[in-house]
Image (tube, coloured by chain):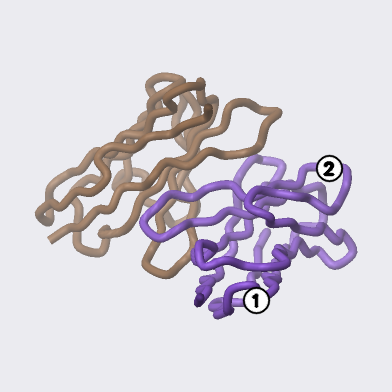
Amino acid sequence: AQSVSQHNHHVILSEAASLELGCNYSYGGTVNLFWYVQYPGQHLQLLLKYFSGDPLVKGIKGFEAEFIKSKFSFNLRKPSVQWSDTAEYFCAVNEPTDKLIFGTGTRLQVFP
Amino acid sequence: GAVVSQHPSWVICKSGTSVKIECRSLDFQATTMFWYRQFPKQSLMLMATSNEGSKATYEQGVEKDKFLINHASLTLSTLTVTSAHPEDSSFYICSANRGQIESEQFFGPGTRLTVL
């Protein structure tokens, strides 16, 4: 069965530090990849998505992710985090049947 | 565009009662709606997928008689938790997508259910 792994469960950074959150999936076929963010008390919002084309995807709020097919990875990056980036981040993979499989999430805390 | 709402945002009920949660796509027609459950500090677990006018498809381990899903229109799906028990307390989230080509799902704000 398809699975999504997020290796970092809890990340603590100071403002202006660089961020990279890991995401690996197991399905070997064609997939769509997503990163969602859940700010405290708010609903899930889409940060960015990859369907096809350029494997380097730019999203909102300065986030980007790189799809590396050979590594089954879709890591999220941001060169300089802000306090407002404190949130839960979820990687998700969309199977051909449309079912979204979520990773376990990474809690990011950014201190001023 | 692509806003999904849920009602209520939170509900507290007594054990043994039933609770209905509504999910609406406000500015688009949703061909498919999804229901998720999120436990504290855990990921979203898909419970079921529903298409308008047909029976929902439940994930393994989800009791379809316990969690009744009705998708009566292209903008409304409901989840009814029947004979709720404290272990059903959770955060229930729905999502919807706009079509078969577009795989992106748009999420509702969630409903916090507490069963006493």
In the displayed structure, A56 sits above or below B79; it is below
Q: Going by the image, does B45 lie left or right of B16?
A: right
Q: In the rendering, which numbered label is found on residue A52?
A: 2
Q: In the rendering, which numbered label is found on residue A32?
A: none
Q: Going by the image, does A3 lie left or right of A74?
A: left
- 10 Å crowding of disc 2: few (<14), some (14-19), many (20+): few
Parent chain of label 2: A
Q: Residue at x 55, y 80 (%)?
A: A12
Q: Residue at x 88, y 47 (%)?
A: A54
* Colour given to chain B in the rendered image: brown
In the displayed structure, B93 sits above or below B3; it is below
Pick whichever, B109 or A17, lies toward us. Answer: A17
Mark 1 secondary-structure assignment: loop
Q: Residue at x 68, y 55 (%)?
A: A62
Residues at marks 2 and 1 on the same chain: yes
Residue A21 seen by the camera: yes
Name the spot of residue A9 as percent of width and height, x first.
56, 76
Q: Quadrant of the C terminus of chain B?
A: bottom left
Parent chain of label 1: A
Name the spot of residue B112 as percent of width and height, x first.
28, 53
Q: Going by the image, does B31 lie left or right of B108?
A: right
Quadrant of the image occupied by residue B89: bottom left
Q: Going by the image, does A39 lie left or right of A65?
A: left
Shown in purple, the chain is A
Three-letter code, disc 2: Ser
Three-letter code, disc 1: His
